Amino acid sequence: ILLLFNMMKFLNNTSNNKFPFDLYRKENWSVEHITPQNPREFKDVGSFIKWLSSFKKYFDSQEEAENDTLVSQLNEVLDSYSGHEEKQLITKVKLESNELVMRDEVVEKITSSLDLHSISNLALLDRNTNSALGNLTFIEKREKLLKIYYSNVDKDDVYIPENTKDVFTKAYTSNNESITDEIFGIKDMEDYKTHLKLILKEFYKDE
């Protein structure tokens, strides 16, 4: 799906540019999680708090009773990290065992509830670049990916698909206010998925 999505970028373009299959065939490909799938490995407290807070805001805005427990747990986890410097390594923060259990439970609930493994959080990327990005935060991934994209004008080293570059620059995000956010949030995911479905709608059969 992601390969077809990137091909359509060229098919829908009125220029004479064509999808670079020669560059595509040179790489081994995988899917990149735009929002990290395992935030427990965030390197510092500040990044982890921003990640948690962005989703707390989302769940807080939903008028569903089942979210009340998660929001309450989110508050507890955020409280457990209060007082620590933003740049302090998350692995260096001493937490009680019950706080660690709560943190892991909350992370699992967020990952499951938001379906971070779905197409709305995935982009096409070669395996080497994917590994290089590792489990960085969204903003760190974007900085590193754009540096590769713009420094490699002739695309001799690695091919970064156009739509992958676009999703990391939030080109599909409709809310201008969220474009500068340091996270790839719920609305970003929804807008990305909507755009992807729009581009590929001609390939879906009517039920």
Image (cartoon, rainbow, N blue to C red):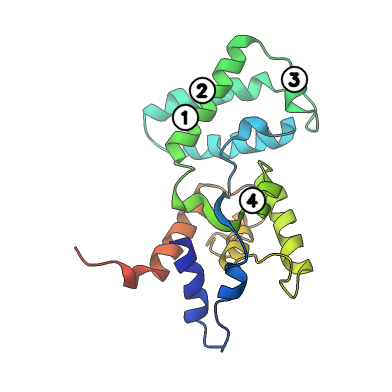
Looking at the picture, which amino acid does disc 1 mark?
Lys
Residues at circles 4 and 3 in contact by the CB criterion of under 8 Å: no
**Mark 3, residue position:** 93
Left/right placement of residue 128 relative to residue 10 reads right
Inter-mark Cα distance, 1 to 2: 6 Å
Q: Position of residue 63 (x, y in %)?
A: 39, 36
Inter-mark Cα distance, 2 to 4: 26 Å
Q: Which mark is residue 32?
A: none
Q: Which mark is residue 109?
A: 1
From the viewer's perspective, is the residue at label 4 or at label 1 nearer? 4
Inter-mark Cα distance, 2 to 3: 18 Å
Residues at circles 2 and 3 in contact by the CB criterion of under 8 Å: no
Among numbered discs 4 and 1, the one appearing first in the sequence? 1
Dot 4: within a 10 Å radius of its alpha carbon, few (fewer than 14), some, or many (20 or more) residues? some
Residues at circles 4 and 1 in contact by the CB criterion of under 8 Å: no
Among numbered discs 4 and 3, the one appearing first in the sequence? 3
Q: Position of residue 164 (x, y in %)?
A: 59, 62
Looking at the picture, which amino acid does disc 2 mark?
Glu
**Mark 4, residue position:** 130
Inter-mark Cα distance, 1 to 3: 22 Å
Q: Which mark is residue 105?
A: 2
Assign a secondary structure to mark 2.
helix
Viewer-nearest residue: 196 or 183: 196
Residues at circles 1 and 2 in contact by the CB criterion of under 8 Å: yes
Q: Which quadrant would residue 49 be assigned to in this image? A: top right
Dot 2: within a 10 Å radius of its alpha carbon, few (fewer than 14), some, or many (20 or more) residues? some
Q: Position of residue 198 (x, y in %)?
A: 39, 68
